[in-house]
Amino acid sequence: MELRRDKSLKHRGEGKQPLVTFDVKFLIESIPDCFEGKAEEASLFLFALHVGARAITCGNVWLCDIRKEVKEDDGRLFVNVRLMRCKGSSNCYHPVTLEKLSEEDKSLDAVYWLRKFILNKFGLDLYNEKLWPLKENGDKLLWSYGTEEMRTRLKKRLELAGFPPEEFGFHSFRSCFLYSAILKAGVNREERDAVLETCALIAGCIPFSKSEMTYVKRVATRTIIAT
């Protein structure tokens, strides 16, 4: 089967195709359960997918950045994390929220894999609301990988899962997140504007600027082609 490509890309590293949700689910399930580092890799990939974070942002998340775990009256569970490093800024403050999914969606559940990873590595239970935020020992990086190792590990996983690694990269998570969020907002202008403002905040650009809207258009094209 011939791979359909976005002809606007030069395929020399300037742009990467989005990893749509189905792709990421397949990627996580392709990691053998016997692999000791599965929880760490799965939590990293899903965190990037669900919040649209770059490798440099994920590489600067500390244990103390996990603020709290919240349970709603309807049984839903949320985990709040603050992002302190964004592109172009080493001193930003951007809170994000992860929602616990159902058991059927375990392969895409960032909270499930994050809890398993933290329990294995640090011996801390993410569901123990009395622990968070940590009063001590919070000065440890959540993921011990450097940004380059994050990209290398993803490339290796993509190749092992049968994806063409040259077509995808860590930014593929972010590209899919942005357009998925825009689609979810639909015709609700306030929600759509909030997505674009968040994107601009993390990217370090002006909201609704020509550069941002050009980027959004390219992402939309790539996502449609990838899908």
Image: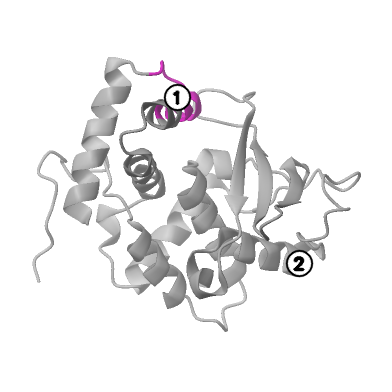
Say above or below: 44 vs 175: below
The residue sitting at 73% across, 50% down in the picture is 70
Residue 30 drawn above or below residue 168: below
**Which quarter shows the N terminus?**
bottom left
Identify which residue is drawn at 45% across, 52% down: 151
**Tag 2 residue:** 119
- Determine which quarter of the picture holds residue 195: top left
Would you say 116 lies left or right of 45 here?
A: right
The magenta stretch is 196-207
Question: Residue 28: x, y in percent?
Answer: 46, 69
Give how far apart the Cα atoms at labels 1 and 2 are.
34 Å
Residue at image position (70%, 52%) is 72
Mark 1: which secondary structure?
helix
Q: Is residue 96 left or right of residue 215?
A: right
Residue 171, given in percent of the width and then of the height, sits at: 38, 44
Residues 40 and 220: in front is 220
Task: Give the image quarter of residue 22.
Answer: bottom left
Would residue 201 be counted in the magenta stretch?
yes
Task: Give the residue displayed 36% in from the left and 51% down from the top.
Answer: 169
Of 6 and 156, nearer the camera is: 6
Which residue carries the number 1 mark? 197
Of residue 27 and residue 14, the one placed in the foreground of this image is 27
Residue 162, visible in the rendered structure: yes
Is the Cβ of the residue at disc 1 closer than 8 Å to that at disc 2? no
Closer to the observer: label 1 or label 2? Answer: 1
Q: Amino acid at mark 2?
A: Leu
